[in-house]
């Protein structure tokens, strides 16, 4: 059924809000921004056609307040809501509220969000669709269950304890031995309760030297499901990705076809619509992949898939929400570039502690093969209440070496951020590291190489510039007028 979207409320802030607004501008669709009190001067607020204040700083009073979001959409005469990523993006209750309010929900159906939001149910559905899964045990209530399962299935340490309702690395703890078990179990449960309001736990065999590979899927309401190939998201800190690339350097063509078709089959089986991602863990020594989860939303790293395919995934989400058919088939998708993304977070690169404040200077990388998704401007504040991501920096090239070269130029020569600390020095050290360049890394890359990466940091700030000018002035005064003057 065809529906018209004339104005979209973006139930988000920062980078995701700005990203969605760009596509709406391309489509001549008006936008509504929502903002909390500390975000009243935020970049996304200035970009939108309409902006509605939805509450105080704590997310529960603003960006997580479903009633206020719906009220803001109705007040601003928006006819659709896009949730971006984070906050309410994977909340089936919110998706249902949007539909019940007579608005268009830009994303998969509430039923599918609910089904995939529970890691235990999702795993059972994957097994039903013949998708390989990691050996594990669900609904764990005490550590004796874990011990019995390990004995029965002949599972050795390490294992990983996860929140069933989890995501974003919260409520996930790796356990190396029996001694750590009890503490890890109670910690995972309390983290799960705090972050998701649900303390249900599952336990799985931990894949050592695993790599994270995810497949981007798009699907319309008419049963057509197409994959846009895969991304590798292995470089992580605290189970959160900071560098992603497409395609994956870990796969050969046979495995690539296998993993992409497996993801497509699963999404077709569950009746998926809109854009979504199937995440796998890849055991590089055994050359086997296992199902991890389905992300029922736009992913942070969707931009690198757009760079290698030339498609606009947000645009496709809008079309699907309007009831249009996908205008292409699987055989029309031919990636022909390599793309790399780094996440610029306002954090101390040596220990990942958050860094808040005002961006006093901002020079954004430009030049060939660079794409920037920014949530800030020079003079903007980075408030302490939300995720510390303020910019995504993407580069592309004919091959991996090219994309890395452009990224090196972008971070080392063309990026300047002052006023807050950022992960830039760490990101630069990673892309210059021989193990990264050769494609030999796992999810433990950062913890294994942290000291070495920090030792590669180049300390450079505006004082260096001042010294450079002072030296130049001193030279002129000492040597008198030069013949080029």
Image (tube, helix red, strand yellow):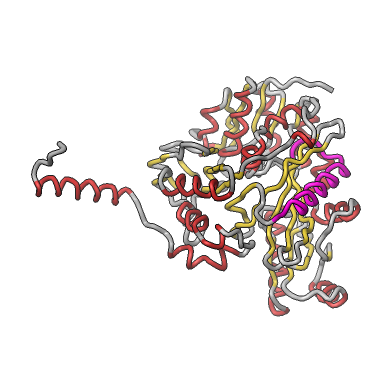
Which of the pair 307/48 is nearer the observer? 307
| Percent coordinates x, y for residue 137 in the rendering | 84, 65
| Percent coordinates x, y for residue 371 in the rendering | 54, 38
In the figure, is residue 393 to the left or right of 457? right
In the figure, is residue 9 to the left or right of 112? left
Q: Which residue is drawn at 78% across and 47% down?
A: 260
Q: Which residue is drawn at 75% across and 43% down?
A: 296
Above or below residue 268? Residue 241 is below
Residue 166 occupies which quadrant of the picture? Answer: bottom right
* Residue 439 among those drawn in magenta: no
- Point out the stretch of residues depicted in magenta: 251-275
Q: Is residue 442 among the parts visible in the rendering?
A: yes
Which of the pair 57/21 is nearer the observer? 21
Which of the pair 418/134 is nearer the observer? 134
* Residue 264 among those drawn in magenta: yes
Above or below residue 124? Residue 10 is above
Image quarter of the N terminus: top right
| Percent coordinates x, y for residue 274 in the rendering | 77, 35
In the figure, is residue 289 to the left or right of 346? right
Image quarter of the C terminus: top left
Above or below residue 186? Residue 200 is above
Q: Is residue 374 among the parts visible in the rendering?
A: no
| Percent coordinates x, y for residue 422 in the rendering | 46, 51
Instruction: Work out which residue is located at the far bottom of the displayed protein and give it.
Output: 179
Q: Main secondary structure of the magenta part?
A: helix
Which of the pair 8/294 is nearer the observer? 294
């Amino acid at each position: 059924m065809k529906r018209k979207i004339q104005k979209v409320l973006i139930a988000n802030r920062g980078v995701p809000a700005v990203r969605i607004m760009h596509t709406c501008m391309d489509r001549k669709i008006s936008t509504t921004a929502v903002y909390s009190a500390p975000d009243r001067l935020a970049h996304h607020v200035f970009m939108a056609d309409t902006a509605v204040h939805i509450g105080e700083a704590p997310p529960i009073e603003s960006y997580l307040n479903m009633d206020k979001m719906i009220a803001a959409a109705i007040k601003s005469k928006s006819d659709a809501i896009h949730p971006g990523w984070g906050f309410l993006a994977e909340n089936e209750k919110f998706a249902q509220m949007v539909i019940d309010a007579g608005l268009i929900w830009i994303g998969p159906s509430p039923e599918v969000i609910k089904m995939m939001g529970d890691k235990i149910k999702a795993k059972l559905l994957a097994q039903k669709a013949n998708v390989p899964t990691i050996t594990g045990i669900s609904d764990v209530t005490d550590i004796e269950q874990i011990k019995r399962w390990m004995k029965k299935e002949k599972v050795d340490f390490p294992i990983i304890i996860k929140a069933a309702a989890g995501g974003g690395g919260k409520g996930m703890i790796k356990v190396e031995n029996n001694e750590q078990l009890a503490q890890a179990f109670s910690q995972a449960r309390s983290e799960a309760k705090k972050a998701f309001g649900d303390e249900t736990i599952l336990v799985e065999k931990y894949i050592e030297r695993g790599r994270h590979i995810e497949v981007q899927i798009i699907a319309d309401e008419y049963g057509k499901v197409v994959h846009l190939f895969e991304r590798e998201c292995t470089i992580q800190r605290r189970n959160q990705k900071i560098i992603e690339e497409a395609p994956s350097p870990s796969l050969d063509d046979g495995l690539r076809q296998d993993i992409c078709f497996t993801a497509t089959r699963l999404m077709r089986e569950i009746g998926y619509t809109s854009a979504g991602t199937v995440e796998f863990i890849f055991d590089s020594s055994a050359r086997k992949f296992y199902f991890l989860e389905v992300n029922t939303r736009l992913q942070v790293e969707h931009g690198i898939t757009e760079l290698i395919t030339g498609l606009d995934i947000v645009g496709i989400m809008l079309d699907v929400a309007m009831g249009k058919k996908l205008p292409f088939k699987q055989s029309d998708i031919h990636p022909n570039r390599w793309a790399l993304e780094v996440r610029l977070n306002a954090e101390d690169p040596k220990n990942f502690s958050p860094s808040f404040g005002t961006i006093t200077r901002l020079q954004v990388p430009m030049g060939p093969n660079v794409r920037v998704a920014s949530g800030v401007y020079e003079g903007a504040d980075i408030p302490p209440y939300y995720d510390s991501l303020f910019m995504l920096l993407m580069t592309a090239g004919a091959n991996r070496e090219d994309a890395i070269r452009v990224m090196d130029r972008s971070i080392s020569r063309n990026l300047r951020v002052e006023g807050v600390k950022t992960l830039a020095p760490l990101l630069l050290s990673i892309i210059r590291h021989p193990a990264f360049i050769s494609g030999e890394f796992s999810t433990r890359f950062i913890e294994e190489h942290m000291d070495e990466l920090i030792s590669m940091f180049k300390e450079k700030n505006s004082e260096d510039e001042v010294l450079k000018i002072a030296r130049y002035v001193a030279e002129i005064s000492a040597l008198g007028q030069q013949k080029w003057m």
